[in-house]
Image (cartoon, rainbow, N blue to C red):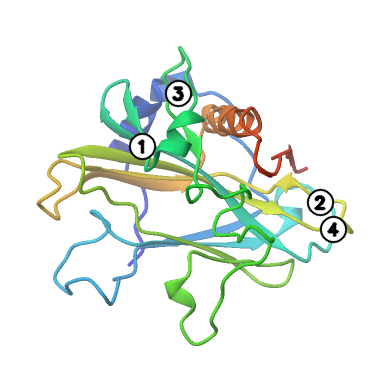
Amino acid sequence: MTMRPTTSSIAVAFLLLGAGPCDDPPKPATCGVFYFSTPQDPYWPPSKPYPGPGRVTLRFTFKPAQCGAVSCGCRKVVFVQAIRFSLSPGNYKQPHDEQTDRMVHSSLPSSDGWAIDTLEGAIQPYYGMNDDGTFPISLSTPDLYSATPGSANSEAVLRDSPVSSEWDSYTIEAISVPVCLDTTSSCDRKILGYYIWSWNVPNKNSSDYGNFSHGPAWTDLYAQAFDEAAQAWNAHVDDGRQMLQLGRLP
């Protein structure tokens, strides 16, 4: 199942960021093609609507020419993701205490409450990466793992199932960012695009959802929010945690 944002859902997303559709800030470039879907998780009831809350699969195919960049032969494309759960306006939460400690605190509604999304205690900022820089993978059951790295010739895949049983109602927002990791490439540590997805869960005991929105970032406010989440990660580097130093392509 593939869904695209409607005019009303785009307006909702701008509202969540504290900006209006008429503000029309710059739009960040995308150096490739995103494909977003909400496949049904085989371990959940077949009748459960998706994605509320459900499983997200985001695929990215790197195409540098699409953003005016030269070919750079990247051998590994991975994701970094920033998220925030909103319980009410200005009341932001994170899935665990360690992520809460490095959550952005800003007077700007567009930046407030975001944090880089990792497992508790992870030293790598890259989504789904093991501490040693590898990714858990099984070719027979790839969809059970959170990420599959891509390259200049293969798609990178992010999988997520954000849900909370703790909060009665909430909104989940995510900024998913593909990044080249290849020290031999001129694209190394470059951001290749920004993809946004969000929805509201009005009742944790119901599978209903509202205000579902997704698509490539349509405002630089998302890039700014992601940058601040990355800075907050770097401000809490300890116990072997790896720095997150990225630039944009092109």
Of marks 3 and 1, which one's residue comes earlier in the chain?
1
Q: Position of residue 155 (x, y in %)?
A: 62, 68
Q: Is residue 60 left or right of residue 38?
A: right
Q: State yes or no: discs 4 and 2 in contact (Cβ < 8 Å).
A: yes
| Cα–Cα gap, marks 4 and 2 | 6 Å
Which dot marks residue 10? 1
Query: Do the residues bearing badges 4 and 1 touch, measured as CB atoms within 8 Å?
Result: no
Q: Earlier in the sequence, mark 2 or mark 1?
A: 1
Q: Nearer the viewer, mark 2 or mark 1?
A: 2
Vertical comparison of 245 with 212: above or below:
above
Quadrant of the rendered image containing residue 230:
top right
Q: Are marks 2 and 1 in contact (CB under 8 Å)?
A: no
Going by the numbered disc 1, the residue's amino acid type is Ile
Quadrant location, the C terminus: top right
Figure quadrant of residue 127: bottom right
Residue hosting label 3: 110
- Residue topped by disc 4: 72
**Is disc 4 placed on a helix, strand or loop?**
loop
Nearer mark to the viewer, of 3 and 1: 3
Residue 128: x and y in percent read: 54, 59
Q: What distance separates the C-alpha of mark 2 from that of mark 1? A: 31 Å
Residue placed under numbered mark 2 in the picture: 187
In which image quadrant can residue 75 be found? bottom right
Mark-to-mark CA distance, 3 and 4: 33 Å
* Image quarter in which the N terminus is found: bottom left
Neighbour class for label 2 at 10 Å: few (<14), some, many (≥20)? many
Q: Amino acid at mark 4?
A: Cys
Q: How dense is the environment of label 4, judged by Cα within 10 Å: few (below 14), some, or many (20 and up)?
A: some
